[in-house]
Amino acid sequence: MDSKVDSHEMLTTLGEMQEQVAKIVEKLTRSIVNITTTRLLPSVFLLPVPAKGVGTGFIIDEEGHVVTNAHVLAEARRAEIYLHDGDMVEARFVGRDPWTDVAVMKIKRKDLEPAELGDSDKLSVGQFVIAIGNSFGLAGGPTVTFGVISALGRHIRTQRGPLLAGLIQTDAAINPGNSGGPLVDLDGKVVGMNTAIIPYAQGIGFAIPINLVSRVAEDLIKLGAVRRPWLGINGVDIDPKMAKHYGLSVSRGALVVNVIRGGPAWRAGLRKGDVIVAIKGREVKGMDDLIGQLWEETPGSVIEVSVVRRNQLVRLRVVLGTPPP
């Protein structure tokens, strides 16, 4: 008897969840755009050949700013944006940042419905999410997939080169064409922007946290460039073998091999041979992790950097700067 009651309650809960997901998708569809790009590829006949590409974006404000992935617009000679009703609208390129894979365009249209943005700092592993996008450029509306947040703070290097740091990992299917589409929680708020998949693996996709997307987009809109924090060091990962060779008391972290004279780290007292083990109390596992944590900050931010120096823990106060031109 109890099991039947439990089953009924479970079915009721699943039915409510299904209804909620359908409502979220219906609402968000009006904020999502399809992007078609044209770029020129070299050919054996010397004349460049036009090649089409597809991606997804979403509207973030009533002024018509649309965010998508920087790689969607890379080398594009032309970009066409299609709204949920099928109308094509003119788009003005605002800016792109390959280092975070965020780009911004602007469209002119009355009665735009921007997506509601959430807070990616409040996400937790196991949380349900929905991925929406223009998979493979198929006609008939966006593709919707459902899954969970598998991990947070992931770092990957893509075929395009730059390190993408601090990513959300999800098992919600992300397919070609989904790039730039929203990752949404069950409150209907965008918590990330879909960016990458691992081609040889199933159930592994990545999204850029929406807080980072918003910050980069704001810089591109207001400044035309991204204010990137700068520590002013070069370093390598520490591993157990290296730690043993150098007689270090820690087996993980970022070993400082060079400090830029006059830079933020130099002024704060960091020196060659220091091992950075934490930023603001959060463990630093290596250089990629260090970069990922720094990208959460802005120039002028004051951070506490914990280093191991001669097997002693030292805490230093660093005021982050901007990279030299």
Image (spheres, rainbow, N blue to C red):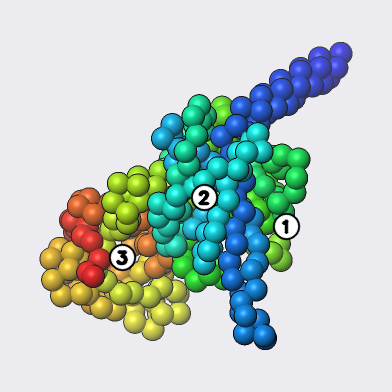
Q: How many marks?
A: 3
Label number found at residue 276: 3
Measure the C-alpha gap from mark 2 to mark 3.
34 Å
Residue placed under numbered mark 2 in the picture: 68
Residue type at mark 3 is Ile
Report, in whole angstroms, how far the alpha carbon at label 1 lies from the one at label 2. Answer: 23 Å
The amino acid type found where label 1 is placed reads Gln
Quadrant into which the C terminus falls: bottom left
Question: Regarding mark 2 in the picture, which secondary structure is present there?
Answer: strand
Q: CA distance from mark 1 to mark 3?
A: 35 Å
> As displayed, is residue 216 above or below residue 198?
above
Mark closest to the chain's N terminus, 1 or 2: 2
Q: Are marks 2 and 3 in contact (CB under 8 Å)?
A: no
Residue 67 showing in the rendered view? no
Residue 133 visible in the shown view: yes
Few, some or many residues within 10 Å of mark 3 (<14, 14–19, 20+)? many
Q: Secondary structure at mark 3?
A: strand
* On screen, residue 88 above or below 97: above
Image-based side of 148 in relation to 234, left or right? right
Q: Residue 86: name its quadrant.
A: top right
83 vs 165, nearest the viewer: 83
- Residue 211: x percent and y percent? 42, 43
Residue 145 falls left or right of residue 7: left
Q: Residue at x 64, y 36 (%)?
A: 84
User: Looking at the picture, how far across and down is residue 64, in whole percent?
Assistant: 45, 38
- Mark 1 neighbour density, 10 Å: few (under 14) some (14–19) many (20 or more): few
Q: Nearest the camera: 8 or 241?
A: 8
Numbered mark located on residue 202 in the image: 1
Which is nearer the N-term, disc 2 or disc 3? 2
- Looking at the image, is 227 positioned above or below residue 88? below
